[in-house]
Image: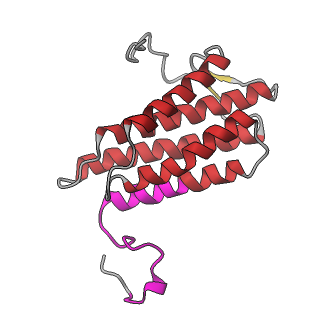
Amino acid sequence: MKPVSRDWDEFCYPFIYEDSPICDFEILSDELCCRIGLVLSLELEPQVREILQRLQPNIYHLNGSVRGKLAISESELVELKQDYHRIREQLEGGFKGFVLPGGHRVSSELHLCRCQAKKVVRALVSIEHHESKKSPDPILFKYANLVANTLYALASYTNRINEVEEVEFVSKSYSMPKSSMPKKKD
């Protein structure tokens, strides 16, 4: 669509009229960054706060890494993976399946962030399928997926430290795969 105005005061975002999934990805990752900001405004356990404070600016780095210069590197990926594994160890693995989102207020907000992170991953997939000129770097897919997993772990961890029991969800539609996930590398 062609812009309806030439007055920059009437543009909320320079690429808002662009017919490209890159714009959608940037808006979705912006929303994720905002949601994390909301969580940071709540009372948090120090470890959760520290992880989210490091994660939030990296979401904006992820945001600009398709249209602009790649700003997520192996060091950000490794750092987030270490955070994820540290939380998972404290959960002693947690549920092997799914839980109903909710519990503590912070956990509920983290589950909304997790859903938003999955939308960011899907937007990257959409770019990959629709853009011939600008294919996202593979590290962006890895990082965005890891963000979603880390947010899930943080939600479970928050419920655990607040002594809120999570409710396991058992699907009537799908059986749990025996081992469809790649093996963990040591």
Q: Is residue 181 magenta?
A: no
- Residue 43, above or below 64: above
Whole-percent x, y for residue 52 in the image: 62, 42
Q: Quadrant of the C terminus?
A: top left
**Which one is in front, 53 or 3?**
53
Q: Residue at x 53, y 51 (%)?
A: 57
**Which one is in front, 86 or 115?**
86
Can residue 171 be seen?
Answer: no
Whole-percent x, y for residue 175 in the image: 49, 16
Whole-percent x, y for residue 36 in the image: 62, 49
- Residue 60, above or below 159: below
Q: How is the image coloured?
A: secondary structure
Q: Quadrant of residue 133?
A: bottom left
Whole-percent x, y for residue 127 in the image: 29, 51
Q: Which residues are magenta?
A: 5-31
Q: Residue furthest right?
A: 163
- Residue 43, above or below 173: below
**Which one is in front, 133 or 165?**
133
Q: Quadrant of residue 17?
A: bottom left
- Residue 55, above or below 6: above
Q: Is residue 19 magenta?
A: yes
What is the count of numbered marks?
0
Q: Residue at x 29, y 47 (%)?
A: 136
Can residue 18 be seen?
Answer: yes
Q: Quadrant of the N terminus?
A: bottom left
Horizontal arrangement in the rendering, residue 162 relative to residue 127 (left or right)? right
